[in-house]
Amino acid sequence: MEIKYDYLIVGAGLFGSVFAHEATKRGKKCLVIDKRKHIAGNIYTENIEGINVHKYGAHIFHTSNKEVWDYVNTFVEFNRFTNSPVANYKGKLYNLPFNMNTFYQLWGVKTPQEAQAKIDEQRVEYAHITEPQNLEEQALVLGGRDIYEKLIKGYTEKQWGRPATEIPAFIIRRLPFRFTFDNNYFNDTYQGIPIGGYTKLVEKLLEGIEVRTRTNYFEHKSELEQLAEKVIFTGKIDEYFGYQFGKLEYRSLHFENELLETPNFQGNAVVNYTNREVPYTRIIEHKHFEFGTQEKTYITREYPHEFSKDNESYYPINDDKNQTLLKQYQQLANKQQHVIFGGRLAEYKYYDMHQVIDAALSKLNEIFKKS
Ligand code: FAD
Ligand code: UDP
Protein backbone atom coordinates (compact mmCIF):
# COMPACT_ATOMS: atom_id res chain seq x y z
CA MET A 1 0.00 0.00 0.00
CA GLU A 2 1.22 3.48 -0.83
CA ILE A 3 2.37 5.69 2.04
CA LYS A 4 0.06 8.70 1.78
CA TYR A 5 0.74 10.59 4.97
CA ASP A 6 3.77 11.68 6.96
CA TYR A 7 1.80 11.38 10.20
CA LEU A 8 -1.13 9.36 11.38
CA ILE A 9 -2.38 11.22 14.45
CA VAL A 10 -4.46 9.14 16.82
CA GLY A 11 -6.72 11.48 18.80
CA ALA A 12 -8.26 14.81 17.79
CA GLY A 13 -7.80 16.32 21.27
CA LEU A 14 -5.60 19.28 22.00
CA PHE A 15 -2.29 17.42 21.72
CA GLY A 16 -3.16 15.75 18.41
CA SER A 17 -4.67 18.90 16.92
CA VAL A 18 -1.77 21.19 17.82
CA PHE A 19 0.66 18.62 16.46
CA ALA A 20 -1.36 18.20 13.25
CA HIS A 21 -1.60 21.95 12.73
CA GLU A 22 2.10 22.59 13.22
CA ALA A 23 3.26 19.61 11.18
CA THR A 24 0.95 20.66 8.31
CA LYS A 25 2.37 24.18 8.50
CA ARG A 26 5.81 22.64 8.02
CA GLY A 27 4.69 20.91 4.84
CA LYS A 28 3.83 17.49 6.28
CA LYS A 29 0.72 15.56 5.35
CA CYS A 30 -1.38 14.42 8.29
CA LEU A 31 -4.36 12.17 8.86
CA VAL A 32 -6.11 12.68 12.20
CA ILE A 33 -8.44 9.99 13.56
CA ASP A 34 -10.59 9.86 16.66
CA LYS A 35 -12.78 7.06 17.97
CA ARG A 36 -15.37 9.54 19.23
CA LYS A 37 -17.98 11.03 16.95
CA HIS A 38 -16.52 14.51 17.40
CA ILE A 39 -13.20 16.33 17.49
CA ALA A 40 -11.66 18.26 20.43
CA GLY A 41 -11.24 15.37 22.88
CA ASN A 42 -12.11 16.34 26.43
CA ILE A 43 -12.35 20.03 25.70
CA TYR A 44 -15.29 19.42 23.37
CA THR A 45 -18.11 21.94 23.78
CA GLU A 46 -21.56 21.49 22.29
CA ASN A 47 -24.00 24.30 21.59
CA ILE A 48 -27.25 23.65 23.45
CA GLU A 49 -29.89 26.40 23.41
CA GLY A 50 -27.18 28.91 22.48
CA ILE A 51 -24.98 27.88 25.44
CA ASN A 52 -21.56 26.27 24.87
CA VAL A 53 -21.76 23.24 27.14
CA HIS A 54 -18.48 21.71 28.35
CA LYS A 55 -19.40 18.08 27.75
CA TYR A 56 -16.45 16.48 29.57
CA GLY A 57 -16.22 18.79 32.57
CA ALA A 58 -15.67 22.51 33.08
CA HIS A 59 -12.60 23.88 31.36
CA ILE A 60 -11.03 27.24 32.13
CA PHE A 61 -7.98 28.24 30.17
CA HIS A 62 -5.28 29.75 32.38
CA THR A 63 -1.56 30.15 31.88
CA SER A 64 1.45 32.31 32.61
CA ASN A 65 3.14 31.07 29.46
CA LYS A 66 2.93 34.04 27.08
CA GLU A 67 3.96 31.98 24.09
CA VAL A 68 1.07 29.55 24.64
CA TRP A 69 -1.39 32.38 25.33
CA ASP A 70 -0.38 34.23 22.14
CA TYR A 71 -0.59 30.94 20.26
CA VAL A 72 -4.20 30.13 21.21
CA ASN A 73 -5.21 33.74 20.58
CA THR A 74 -4.18 33.44 16.95
CA PHE A 75 -7.04 30.94 16.48
CA VAL A 76 -9.83 32.33 18.67
CA GLU A 77 -10.57 35.31 20.82
CA PHE A 78 -10.87 34.70 24.58
CA ASN A 79 -13.39 36.38 26.87
CA ARG A 80 -12.57 37.94 30.26
CA PHE A 81 -13.90 35.04 32.39
CA THR A 82 -12.11 34.66 35.73
CA ASN A 83 -12.84 31.52 37.66
CA SER A 84 -14.09 32.35 41.15
CA PRO A 85 -15.92 29.30 42.47
CA VAL A 86 -18.10 29.39 45.54
CA ALA A 87 -18.12 26.56 48.07
CA ASN A 88 -21.33 25.37 49.67
CA TYR A 89 -20.67 23.62 52.99
CA LYS A 90 -23.88 22.45 54.67
CA GLY A 91 -25.84 25.33 53.10
CA LYS A 92 -23.39 28.09 53.99
CA LEU A 93 -21.43 29.79 51.19
CA TYR A 94 -17.70 30.53 51.14
CA ASN A 95 -15.51 32.11 48.49
CA LEU A 96 -12.68 30.12 46.96
CA PRO A 97 -9.75 29.89 46.71
CA PHE A 98 -8.78 30.49 50.34
CA ASN A 99 -8.56 34.26 50.66
CA MET A 100 -9.64 37.19 52.87
CA ASN A 101 -13.29 36.74 51.84
CA THR A 102 -13.16 33.11 52.97
CA PHE A 103 -11.45 33.99 56.24
CA TYR A 104 -14.10 36.64 56.93
CA GLN A 105 -16.88 34.14 56.20
CA LEU A 106 -15.26 31.52 58.43
CA TRP A 107 -14.22 33.62 61.41
CA GLY A 108 -15.40 37.23 60.92
CA VAL A 109 -11.78 38.47 60.69
CA LYS A 110 -11.48 41.70 58.72
CA THR A 111 -7.77 42.40 58.29
CA PRO A 112 -4.86 40.30 57.01
CA GLN A 113 -3.27 40.57 60.49
CA GLU A 114 -6.40 39.18 62.17
CA ALA A 115 -6.63 36.41 59.56
CA GLN A 116 -2.97 35.50 59.99
CA ALA A 117 -3.34 35.37 63.75
CA LYS A 118 -6.40 33.10 63.47
CA ILE A 119 -4.63 30.75 61.05
CA ASP A 120 -1.51 30.66 63.22
CA GLU A 121 -3.70 29.73 66.18
CA GLN A 122 -5.34 26.96 64.12
CA ARG A 123 -2.02 25.62 62.86
CA VAL A 124 -0.20 25.50 66.14
CA GLU A 125 -1.10 21.86 66.84
CA TYR A 126 0.45 20.82 63.50
CA ALA A 127 3.75 22.69 63.94
CA HIS A 128 5.55 19.36 64.34
CA ILE A 129 4.74 18.41 60.72
CA THR A 130 7.76 19.74 58.90
CA GLU A 131 7.36 17.71 55.74
CA PRO A 132 3.70 16.89 55.02
CA GLN A 133 3.40 13.30 53.82
CA ASN A 134 -0.10 13.48 52.39
CA LEU A 135 -2.91 15.87 51.47
CA GLU A 136 -4.44 15.94 54.94
CA GLU A 137 -1.17 16.90 56.61
CA GLN A 138 -0.44 19.47 53.92
CA ALA A 139 -3.88 21.10 54.26
CA LEU A 140 -3.67 21.23 58.06
CA VAL A 141 -0.21 22.78 57.91
CA LEU A 142 -1.38 25.36 55.36
CA GLY A 143 -4.62 26.52 56.92
CA GLY A 144 -5.51 24.58 60.05
CA ARG A 145 -8.51 22.51 61.04
CA ASP A 146 -11.52 24.74 60.10
CA ILE A 147 -10.51 25.20 56.48
CA TYR A 148 -9.57 21.55 56.18
CA GLU A 149 -12.81 20.20 57.65
CA LYS A 150 -15.20 22.61 55.93
CA LEU A 151 -13.65 23.19 52.54
CA ILE A 152 -11.17 20.42 51.79
CA LYS A 153 -11.74 17.04 53.45
CA GLY A 154 -15.20 16.16 52.11
CA TYR A 155 -14.57 17.47 48.60
CA THR A 156 -11.20 15.75 48.33
CA GLU A 157 -12.40 12.40 49.62
CA LYS A 158 -15.38 12.44 47.25
CA GLN A 159 -13.21 13.51 44.35
CA TRP A 160 -10.54 10.87 44.84
CA GLY A 161 -12.59 8.10 46.48
CA ARG A 162 -10.04 7.53 49.23
CA PRO A 163 -9.00 9.09 52.55
CA ALA A 164 -7.10 12.38 52.32
CA THR A 165 -4.26 10.65 54.16
CA GLU A 166 -3.72 8.50 51.04
CA ILE A 167 -3.58 11.38 48.56
CA PRO A 168 -0.33 13.14 47.63
CA ALA A 169 0.25 16.55 49.24
CA PHE A 170 1.01 18.36 45.96
CA ILE A 171 -2.64 18.17 44.84
CA ILE A 172 -3.74 20.74 47.40
CA ARG A 173 -0.75 22.96 46.69
CA ARG A 174 -2.39 23.70 43.30
CA LEU A 175 -4.82 26.02 45.09
CA PRO A 176 -3.83 29.60 46.00
CA PHE A 177 -3.88 30.69 49.63
CA ARG A 178 -3.80 34.46 49.92
CA PHE A 179 -4.34 37.36 52.30
CA THR A 180 -6.11 39.67 49.85
CA PHE A 181 -9.79 39.94 48.92
CA ASP A 182 -9.19 38.20 45.61
CA ASN A 183 -11.46 35.35 44.50
CA ASN A 184 -9.48 34.49 41.37
CA TYR A 185 -8.97 30.71 41.53
CA PHE A 186 -5.72 30.93 39.58
CA ASN A 187 -2.52 32.93 40.03
CA ASP A 188 -1.78 32.85 36.31
CA THR A 189 -1.21 35.96 34.20
CA TYR A 190 -3.73 35.02 31.49
CA GLN A 191 -7.17 33.48 31.76
CA GLY A 192 -10.38 33.18 29.75
CA ILE A 193 -12.75 31.03 27.73
CA PRO A 194 -12.68 30.91 23.91
CA ILE A 195 -15.53 32.94 22.48
CA GLY A 196 -17.63 30.41 20.56
CA GLY A 197 -16.42 27.46 22.67
CA TYR A 198 -13.37 25.20 22.76
CA THR A 199 -14.59 23.16 19.80
CA LYS A 200 -14.09 26.25 17.65
CA LEU A 201 -10.46 26.45 18.75
CA VAL A 202 -9.88 22.84 17.68
CA GLU A 203 -11.81 23.33 14.42
CA LYS A 204 -9.42 26.17 13.60
CA LEU A 205 -6.40 24.05 14.45
CA LEU A 206 -7.63 21.28 12.17
CA GLU A 207 -8.72 23.50 9.28
CA GLY A 208 -7.67 21.95 5.96
CA ILE A 209 -6.50 18.69 7.60
CA GLU A 210 -8.11 15.32 6.89
CA VAL A 211 -9.99 14.11 9.96
CA ARG A 212 -11.84 10.81 10.39
CA THR A 213 -14.03 10.58 13.49
CA ARG A 214 -15.64 7.33 14.72
CA THR A 215 -12.39 5.60 13.80
CA ASN A 216 -10.76 3.47 16.46
CA TYR A 217 -7.06 2.98 15.88
CA PHE A 218 -7.05 -0.52 17.35
CA GLU A 219 -9.82 -1.72 15.07
CA HIS A 220 -7.95 -0.65 11.91
CA LYS A 221 -4.34 -0.65 13.13
CA SER A 222 -2.60 -2.49 10.32
CA GLU A 223 -4.34 -0.65 7.45
CA LEU A 224 -3.92 2.73 9.12
CA GLU A 225 -0.25 2.25 9.95
CA GLN A 226 0.55 1.37 6.36
CA LEU A 227 -0.74 4.76 5.31
CA ALA A 228 1.77 6.83 7.27
CA GLU A 229 5.48 7.12 8.02
CA LYS A 230 4.95 7.81 11.70
CA VAL A 231 2.22 7.62 14.31
CA ILE A 232 1.45 10.24 16.94
CA PHE A 233 -0.47 8.34 19.57
CA THR A 234 -2.53 10.32 22.12
CA GLY A 235 -4.67 7.42 23.41
CA LYS A 236 -3.89 5.28 26.46
CA ILE A 237 -0.36 3.96 26.67
CA ASP A 238 -1.43 0.75 28.48
CA GLU A 239 -4.08 0.03 25.85
CA TYR A 240 -1.49 0.50 23.10
CA PHE A 241 0.52 -2.35 24.61
CA GLY A 242 -2.52 -4.59 25.12
CA TYR A 243 -2.52 -4.00 28.92
CA GLN A 244 0.26 -6.57 29.10
CA PHE A 245 1.49 -5.44 32.52
CA GLY A 246 -2.01 -4.58 33.79
CA LYS A 247 -4.28 -1.54 33.60
CA LEU A 248 -3.33 1.97 34.67
CA GLU A 249 -6.05 3.28 36.97
CA TYR A 250 -7.95 6.52 36.65
CA ARG A 251 -10.51 8.45 38.63
CA SER A 252 -13.65 8.81 36.57
CA LEU A 253 -16.60 11.20 36.59
CA HIS A 254 -20.28 10.92 35.90
CA PHE A 255 -22.16 13.97 34.63
CA GLU A 256 -25.85 14.57 35.22
CA ASN A 257 -27.18 17.28 32.94
CA GLU A 258 -30.34 19.37 33.17
CA LEU A 259 -31.82 22.07 30.98
CA LEU A 260 -33.81 24.42 33.20
CA GLU A 261 -36.54 26.89 32.25
CA THR A 262 -34.92 29.66 34.26
CA PRO A 263 -32.33 32.21 33.16
CA ASN A 264 -30.12 31.89 36.25
CA PHE A 265 -29.88 28.87 38.54
CA GLN A 266 -26.94 29.55 40.87
CA GLY A 267 -25.45 32.90 39.82
CA ASN A 268 -21.98 31.47 39.24
CA ALA A 269 -20.29 29.11 36.77
CA VAL A 270 -18.97 26.80 39.50
CA VAL A 271 -20.37 25.94 42.93
CA ASN A 272 -18.46 23.26 44.88
CA TYR A 273 -20.26 21.12 47.44
CA THR A 274 -17.62 20.48 50.05
CA ASN A 275 -19.46 18.29 52.54
CA ARG A 276 -19.37 14.55 52.23
CA GLU A 277 -23.14 14.02 52.43
CA VAL A 278 -23.86 15.67 49.06
CA PRO A 279 -22.89 13.00 46.51
CA TYR A 280 -21.69 15.37 43.77
CA THR A 281 -18.60 17.58 44.03
CA ARG A 282 -19.87 20.55 42.06
CA ILE A 283 -22.57 22.04 39.91
CA ILE A 284 -21.53 23.82 36.73
CA GLU A 285 -23.82 26.41 35.16
CA HIS A 286 -22.31 26.67 31.70
CA LYS A 287 -23.79 29.99 30.53
CA HIS A 288 -21.83 31.91 33.19
CA PHE A 289 -18.56 30.94 31.50
CA GLU A 290 -19.57 33.27 28.70
CA PHE A 291 -21.85 35.78 30.44
CA GLY A 292 -24.88 34.24 28.69
CA THR A 293 -28.25 35.98 28.76
CA GLN A 294 -30.39 33.16 27.32
CA GLU A 295 -33.85 32.48 28.76
CA LYS A 296 -32.89 28.94 29.75
CA THR A 297 -29.91 27.54 31.57
CA TYR A 298 -27.97 24.28 31.38
CA ILE A 299 -26.43 22.78 34.50
CA THR A 300 -24.24 19.76 35.19
CA ARG A 301 -23.82 17.92 38.46
CA GLU A 302 -20.43 16.28 38.62
CA TYR A 303 -20.19 12.94 40.45
CA PRO A 304 -16.80 11.34 40.99
CA HIS A 305 -16.84 7.73 39.96
CA GLU A 306 -14.82 4.57 40.24
CA PHE A 307 -13.05 3.74 37.03
CA SER A 308 -14.29 0.80 34.97
CA LYS A 309 -14.18 -0.21 31.34
CA ASP A 310 -17.47 1.60 30.68
CA ASN A 311 -16.34 4.93 32.14
CA GLU A 312 -14.17 7.63 30.63
CA SER A 313 -10.66 7.90 32.08
CA TYR A 314 -10.28 11.36 33.57
CA TYR A 315 -7.69 11.78 36.29
CA PRO A 316 -4.52 9.64 36.43
CA ILE A 317 -3.82 8.26 39.89
CA ASN A 318 -0.57 9.48 41.31
CA ASP A 319 0.51 6.59 43.49
CA ASP A 320 3.49 4.26 43.50
CA LYS A 321 1.61 1.31 42.03
CA ASN A 322 0.46 3.21 38.94
CA GLN A 323 3.71 5.13 38.50
CA THR A 324 5.68 1.86 38.54
CA LEU A 325 3.33 0.39 35.96
CA LEU A 326 3.70 3.52 33.85
CA LYS A 327 7.50 3.16 33.85
CA GLN A 328 7.15 -0.38 32.48
CA TYR A 329 5.01 0.85 29.60
CA GLN A 330 7.34 3.79 28.99
CA GLN A 331 10.22 1.37 28.52
CA LEU A 332 8.27 -0.35 25.76
CA ALA A 333 7.26 3.00 24.27
CA ASN A 334 10.89 4.11 24.03
CA LYS A 335 11.57 1.15 21.75
CA GLN A 336 8.81 2.07 19.27
CA GLN A 337 10.80 4.04 16.69
CA HIS A 338 7.84 4.96 14.50
CA VAL A 339 5.44 5.98 17.30
CA ILE A 340 5.47 9.16 19.38
CA PHE A 341 3.39 9.10 22.55
CA GLY A 342 1.92 12.42 23.73
CA GLY A 343 -0.89 13.97 25.76
CA ARG A 344 -2.65 13.15 29.01
CA LEU A 345 -3.51 9.49 28.22
CA ALA A 346 -0.31 8.48 26.49
CA GLU A 347 1.86 10.17 29.11
CA TYR A 348 -0.58 9.35 31.96
CA LYS A 349 -0.17 12.89 33.25
CA TYR A 350 -2.42 15.36 35.08
CA TYR A 351 -1.95 17.96 32.32
CA ASP A 352 -3.73 21.31 32.04
CA MET A 353 -4.57 22.57 28.57
CA HIS A 354 -1.72 25.07 28.38
CA GLN A 355 0.73 22.34 29.40
CA VAL A 356 -0.57 19.99 26.72
CA ILE A 357 -0.14 22.70 24.08
CA ASP A 358 3.36 23.41 25.34
CA ALA A 359 4.18 19.69 25.30
CA ALA A 360 2.92 19.29 21.71
CA LEU A 361 4.88 22.34 20.51
CA SER A 362 8.03 21.14 22.27
CA LYS A 363 7.71 17.65 20.83
CA LEU A 364 7.29 19.12 17.39
CA ASN A 365 10.32 21.39 17.71
CA GLU A 366 12.36 18.45 18.90
CA ILE A 367 11.35 16.36 15.87
CA PHE A 368 11.87 19.10 13.33
CA LYS A 369 15.23 20.09 14.78
CA LYS A 370 16.41 16.51 14.24
CA SER A 371 15.17 16.24 10.66
P1 FAD B 1 -7.79 14.21 25.11
O1 FAD B 1 -8.54 15.48 25.07
O2 FAD B 1 -8.29 13.14 26.00
O3 FAD B 1 -7.67 13.65 23.63
C1 FAD B 1 -7.32 12.31 23.34
C2 FAD B 1 -8.20 11.85 22.20
O4 FAD B 1 -7.76 10.58 21.74
C3 FAD B 1 -9.66 11.67 22.60
O5 FAD B 1 -10.50 12.45 21.78
C4 FAD B 1 -9.91 10.17 22.40
O6 FAD B 1 -11.21 9.88 21.93
C5 FAD B 1 -8.87 9.82 21.35
N1 FAD B 1 -8.49 8.40 21.37
C6 FAD B 1 -8.09 7.67 22.42
N2 FAD B 1 -7.87 6.40 22.05
C7 FAD B 1 -8.14 6.33 20.73
C8 FAD B 1 -8.14 5.27 19.79
N3 FAD B 1 -7.81 4.03 20.14
N4 FAD B 1 -8.49 5.54 18.52
C9 FAD B 1 -8.85 6.80 18.15
N5 FAD B 1 -8.89 7.82 19.00
C10 FAD B 1 -8.54 7.60 20.29
N6 FAD B 1 -7.31 21.85 31.86
C11 FAD B 1 -7.24 23.19 32.01
O7 FAD B 1 -6.29 23.83 31.52
N7 FAD B 1 -8.24 23.89 32.64
C12 FAD B 1 -9.32 23.27 33.19
O8 FAD B 1 -10.19 23.93 33.76
C13 FAD B 1 -9.40 21.85 33.07
N8 FAD B 1 -10.45 21.19 33.57
C14 FAD B 1 -10.50 19.84 33.48
C15 FAD B 1 -11.60 19.19 34.02
C16 FAD B 1 -11.69 17.82 33.94
C17 FAD B 1 -12.90 17.12 34.51
C18 FAD B 1 -10.63 17.07 33.35
C19 FAD B 1 -10.68 15.59 33.32
C20 FAD B 1 -9.55 17.72 32.78
C21 FAD B 1 -9.47 19.11 32.84
N9 FAD B 1 -8.41 19.79 32.25
C22 FAD B 1 -8.35 21.16 32.38
C23 FAD B 1 -7.36 19.08 31.48
C24 FAD B 1 -7.65 19.01 29.96
O9 FAD B 1 -8.87 18.34 29.74
C25 FAD B 1 -6.51 18.26 29.25
O10 FAD B 1 -5.29 18.90 29.51
C26 FAD B 1 -6.64 18.14 27.71
O11 FAD B 1 -7.94 17.88 27.30
C27 FAD B 1 -5.75 17.02 27.23
O12 FAD B 1 -5.74 16.92 25.82
P2 FAD B 1 -5.20 15.58 25.13
O13 FAD B 1 -5.19 15.82 23.68
O14 FAD B 1 -3.96 15.14 25.79
O15 FAD B 1 -6.27 14.46 25.55
N1 UDP C 1 -10.15 21.00 46.55
C1 UDP C 1 -10.82 21.05 47.76
N2 UDP C 1 -11.94 21.80 47.86
C2 UDP C 1 -12.44 22.52 46.83
C3 UDP C 1 -11.74 22.47 45.60
C4 UDP C 1 -10.60 21.70 45.50
O1 UDP C 1 -10.42 20.41 48.71
O2 UDP C 1 -13.47 23.18 46.98
C5 UDP C 1 -8.95 20.14 46.48
C6 UDP C 1 -9.26 18.74 45.92
O3 UDP C 1 -8.42 17.82 46.58
C7 UDP C 1 -8.85 18.86 44.47
C8 UDP C 1 -7.63 19.78 44.59
O4 UDP C 1 -7.99 20.70 45.62
O5 UDP C 1 -8.52 17.61 43.92
C9 UDP C 1 -7.29 20.52 43.33
O6 UDP C 1 -8.40 21.29 42.93
P1 UDP C 1 -8.64 21.70 41.44
O7 UDP C 1 -9.79 22.60 41.37
O8 UDP C 1 -7.33 22.17 40.89
O9 UDP C 1 -9.05 20.31 40.82
P2 UDP C 1 -9.24 19.84 39.31
O10 UDP C 1 -10.67 19.43 39.23
O11 UDP C 1 -8.87 20.97 38.40
O12 UDP C 1 -8.31 18.71 39.25
Image (cartoon, rainbow, N blue to C red):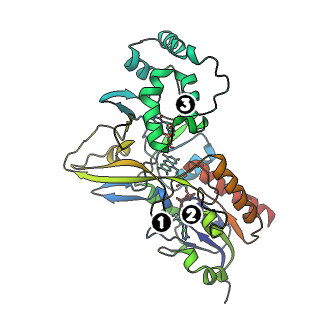
The dot on residue 195 is none
Q: Disc 2 designates what residue?
A: 17
SS label for mark 1: loop
Residue type (three-letter) at the residue carrying disc 3: Glu
Question: Is 229 on the left-hand or right-hand side of 288?
Answer: right
> How far apart are labels 1 and 2 at the CA level?
9 Å
* Image vertical order of residue 266 relative to residue 232, above or below: above
Mark 2: C-beta under 8 Å from nearest atom of ligand 1: yes
SS label for mark 2: helix
Q: Disc 1 designates what residue?
A: 39
The dot on residue 136 is 3
> How far apart are labels 3 and 1 at the CA level?
38 Å
Q: Give the mark toward the camera: 3 or 1.
A: 3
**Residue drawn at the location 58% of the way across and 64% of the way down:** 235
Locate the N terminus and report the quarter of the image it occupies.
bottom right
Mark before the other along the chain sequence, 3 or 1: 1
**Residue drawn at the location 70% of the way across and 61% of the way down:** 329
Mark before the other along the chain sequence, 2 or 3: 2
C-beta proximity under 8 Å, tags 1 and 2: yes
